[in-house]
Amino acid sequence: MIPSAKETPWGNVLVFAQNTFYQGKILNIVKGEATSLQTHSLRHTDIYLDSGVLLVQHNGVKQKMEPGEKRHFIPSDVYRMVALEDARVIEVSTAHTNEKTRVEDRYGRK
């Protein structure tokens, strides 16, 4: 697989691994920007904060996340990441790539 990059309203995503079992991404989130408040019906997701500082909203609870920390999200969890500083997040998830539901999005995406 050739890595693929995609610009987003909050920064960019580099997909570095994808197969029938899992997907690996690097998310670069710009200070002050946020991912969608989202949920998944099938996907399990693990994130590791490589650099920067995040405010993670997870099932209604907000927690600060520092470099070296990780989080695990299971199907039906509702979560978003807000960059308090420019942040680089390593994300690995199960390969269910098209079942995200955006609950809320700052940028008007559906």
Image: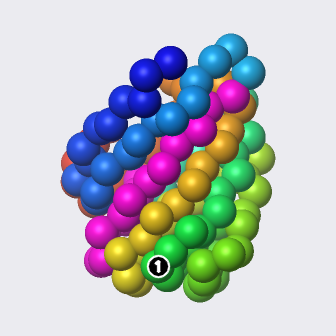
Picture quadrant where residue 75 is located: top right
Q: Name the spot of residue 38 as percent of width and height, x first.
A: 52, 49
Q: Is residue 23 magenta?
A: yes
Q: Is residue 29 above or below residue 73?
A: below
Mark 1 packing: few (<14 Cα in 10 Å), some, or many (20+)? many
Q: Is residue 32 magenta?
A: yes
Q: Name the spot of residue 14 as percent of width and height, x first.
A: 41, 41
Residue at the spot 65% in from the left edge and 62% down from the top edge: 48
Q: Is residue 49 above or below residue 17?
A: below
In the image, what residue type sits under mark 1?
Gly
**6 sits left or right of 51 in the view:** left
Frontmost residue, 64 versus 38: 64
> Magenta segment range?
22-36
Q: Quadrant of the C terminus?
A: top left
Q: Work out whether residue 41 can be spotted.
A: no
Q: Name the spot of residue 30 as percent of width and height, x first.
A: 30, 69
Residue at the spot 30% in from the left edge and 77% down from the top edge: 32
Q: Is residue 25 above or below residue 85?
A: above
Frontmost residue, 4 versus 40: 4
The residue tagged 1 is: 52
Q: Name the spot of residue 77 as percent of width and height, x first.
A: 69, 52
**61 sits left or right of 86 in the view:** right
Q: Work out whether residue 65 can be spotted.
A: yes
Q: Is residue 37 above or below residue 94?
A: below
**5 sits left or right of 95 in the view:** left
| Helix, strand or loop for disc 1 | loop
Could you tell me how many numbered marks the image carries?
1
**73 sits left or right of 2 in the view:** right
As drawn, which residue projects farthest toward the top? 20
Residue at the spot 31% in from the left edge and 50% down from the top edge: 12
Frontmost residue, 59 versus 97: 97
